[in-house]
Structures are given as C-alpha cells and as structure tokens.
Amino acid sequence: MVQLSLIVLGLIASGVQGAPLNKRIAQTISASTAKWEQACLAAGGGQKCNPVSVTAFTTLLAAAGPCEQQNAADQMIDLAKELNNDAQVIRLAQIFAQQPRNTPTSQSVPYCQQAPKNAELNGLFQCQFAGANQKVFVGGVAVGQPGTIPFGKNAPVSPPGSCPANPQGPIADGTQLVDITQNPGVGSAGNGNAGNTAPQTSKAPPAPPASTATVAPSAPSASAPSPPASSAPANTGAGGFKLQNGKDAQALNAKFKTLNANSACNDGEDGCVNGGFAQCVNGKFIITQCAGGLTCQALPLVNKPGTSVTCTTADDAAARIAATGATGGVDGAGGAAPAPSASGSTNNAVAAPAAPAAAAPAANGFKLQNGKDAQDLNAKFRTLTASSACNDGENACVNGGFAQCVNGKFVTTQCSGGLTCAALPLVNKPGTSITCTTAADAAARIQATGATGGITGA
C-alpha cells in the first residue's frame, strides 16, 4: 500500500511538474446554472430542472466540445418553453450560453460553428476569461482561423473576449456572467461584431443569489480537494446560500455516482469515484479509497457559498446536507452515499478519521468534544514541517497543505483555489475529518460545536 501511495503521489507530482507554463483558467461550474435552476423550479419544472442544470454546467469543462454548451442552452430553452415560455428561465439560459468555458492553457476557447436549435440563442456566443490570450485559441490557433470567429460573424470579435451580454470585453477569471449582468444582450443571426449588438433591457426580475459547487471534477472539481467557493452574495435568510450549498452538494454527489475509473476528466479535476477520492492526472482518474470506513462526498460549506469534497461518513454527509434545509438525502433523490472500500489510503486532501472521542450522554456531548479534538489537531498541525517524523499512512496538514506520511516522511499536496488544510469536527458521531476548506468555514464548523477559541482553541 505504501508503494501504491508513492506511485499515486508520484503521478500527481509529475502531472503538476509537467504542466504547461500557461495556467489553467477554471471556475466553479455549478454556479453557472444555479440561478437558472432556481427559476426553473419556481416556474414549476420540478424534477426536470436539476438534470438539465447538471448537464449544462458540465459543458463548461475544458474537455467539452465547442458546441456542447450551446446544445445544453437549447435544452434549457426547450424546458422553458414547456413551462409556458417562462421569460426568466429563457433569459437565464441565454446568459448561460455566453458564460466563458474553462481553458486548460490560458488560451481563448473556440466558438461553436453551427446554428442553435432555438431562435432565442441566435447570435449568442461565449465571452472569454480576461486571463486568456485573446489572440491565440486553444491549440495555438491564431485569430481569423476556423473556430476563432463566432458562427454567423464575418470578422473577429471586437473587443476581443466580449460577448453580447458583456460587450465591453472579457470577464474576470472564474467570474459568473450571471452575477455581472441580468441582460443577455439578445443577439441576432446577422454578421458583424459582438460590440455591434446593443444590449436590451430585460423586464424579468433579478434572480436570487447563486452559489457554487465544484465539480469536480474534478470536479469536482469538482476541482481541487475542496472546490473554491464563488463570490456570491451573502445569505439573506433561511432560503439563501446555505440551502443552495446543500442543493449544490447534492448535485455534485448525483454526478459523482455516474463517474467511473474510465470517465473522461480534465487534469487537476477532483471528485468522488466509487466512494473513493479521485484526482484527474494525465486525463485519467487516479482513485484513492477513503480510509477508516469513510466514503467520499461533496459537503456544503456553512459560512459562505460553496462546497467541499472530502472523505466522511455517509451519515455525516446526510446530516450536513439536511442541516441546510435541502431534502432528498446526499444526492437529492433520497440516495445514500456509496459504500466505502475496505482498503486503500488517502491522499490530496481526503479526510483522515481522527481517533474517536468518547461519546457523552449530554446533549452537547460528542459534538463539543469533536470540536475540541479538531482544535487539538489543528494546533498540532501548526507545529509540523515537511521533515517532521511521522508514521506511514498518517494524514495531517503541513504548512496549509494536505500531507500523507510515506516511508516515514510527509508528502504534501497544496490545496488549490486559496483553500487551506484543516481538521473539522464530524456532526453525527465522535470523530474528525481532514480536508481543504476556507479558514472561515473551519472556524464556523468548530464554533457550531460549542468549542471556543477558534480553529486551534487558542
């Protein structure tokens, strides 16, 4: 098992070291359809909304074809027409059709070269992220070559990176277009440039605040051990981001159940495959089974929009999601978490179970103790370095990264997306987990147990 861990960690390290100099530009893809799904539900779409939403946001991954996003937007429009041509659902689908897609090489993403099914999408094409090279498209294709000019246009987009919904130019890396504008810009099928399409005022009311999820893959992401949270507005009530976080976690868990070791993935994408934590390395999922009878799950953050991916118990995942007000279990359909594998070790921010605390009969018994145990672990982690002595298979946090002990030495994988490694308390049984999350989320989870003194108790 130690040799297997070395191989897995070596593959991860080689994948990182062999990455191109141009950075990957990604986003929290589930946030792109969160408002659309809310509008769809409000219009009476019921159980039809979420599958369309999940299918749509996965088309933003770098591996998707140039027309898959438009095809997904067509499906969103089709459903809107079933719902009495709901204007809000149509408008948000038009905005989604223009959301930038992930780029694996900091180069612009090619445009679809075919007409959409629905006229409401005529003339619409995706914006580009500001960090992308606006003169070179993925594959090193120069502007003016096939795929670099939107369908129906006879000249490159001007200004470069713009789209009808944001005619000023590209949008900030990782940003959701739907958080910037409620105006889809309403394109046309004629020739010309994006800047020539005059925005039109939409009479539809603003959609409620959106939140994340990652994908993982990888997110995912899922991407990153815990997908980075979006900068969506703060919760304004019982139906705010906490409920949406629960739904986003359910959507990710539903997606994870469709993945297997042969599923297509993007390098750096993280997720859960057959109950194990999975990271995409060289286009293939490397799966590490959770230790200690745990199973891999997407969980909702508690203090801001977002989700995390970690190893935990099935009951803990269900309890955390239920606490947001989301119904339907871990995947929104009443499904349970995948059964954990009996073998394997963890890596790259999967959770390691702490020694169970003795359950107390009082109402605030093990939960408070779990908070204190998490604080003790976090205090200990701050004393560790890459050269600290350790026991094979031991998991910890070292300098903010997830660390696993291999051959008596910590091998550390840094958390991505501005996250940090921390021990968190379980909520339904004695114990803790270790994952990548935000410092504020870790503090909030510990405080919720009644433990005082912040992340470390100090």
Image (cartoon, rainbow, N blue to C red):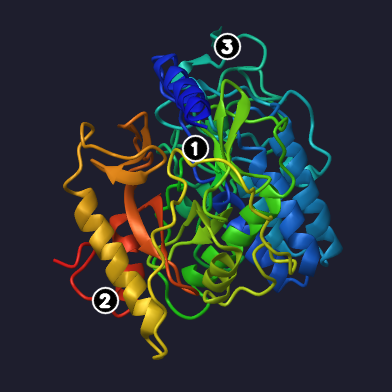
Of the two numbered discs 2 and 1 on the same chain, state the one appearing first in sequence. 1
Q: Nearer the viewer, mark 2 or mark 1?
A: 2
Q: Position of residue 65 (x, y in %)?
A: 71, 27
- Tell me: residue 52, above or below residue 388: below
Q: Position of residue 88 (x, y in %)?
A: 67, 63
Q: CA distance from mark 2 to mark 1?
A: 50 Å
Closer-to-camera residue (232/11):
11
**Callout 3: SS:** loop
381 lies left or right of 72: left
Label 1 crowd bin: few (<14), some (14–19), many (20+), radius 10 Å = many
Q: Secondary structure at mark 2?
A: loop
In the rendered image, which residue does mark 2 sit on? 451
Name the residue: 43% across, 52% down. 229
Viewer can see residue 443:
no
Query: What is the x, y in percent for residue 430?
Result: 43, 71
- Frontmost residue, 209 versus 406: 406
Residue pointed to by mark 3: 139
Q: Is residue 99 left or right of residue 371?
A: right
In terms of depth relative to the viewer, which is nearer, 419 or 131?
419
Badge 3: few (under 14), some or many (20 or more) residues near its Cα, within 10 Å? few
The residue where tag 1 is placed is: 167
Task: Looking at the image, tell me whether mark 3 or mark 1 is earlier in sequence order.
Answer: 3
Q: How far apart are labels 2 and 3 at the CA level?
A: 52 Å
Amino acid type shown at disc 2: Ala
Marks 3, 1: nearer the viewer: 3
Residue at 61% x, 73% y is 326
Q: Is residue 339 above or below residue 427?
A: above
Q: Position of residue 300 (x, y in %)?
A: 50, 62
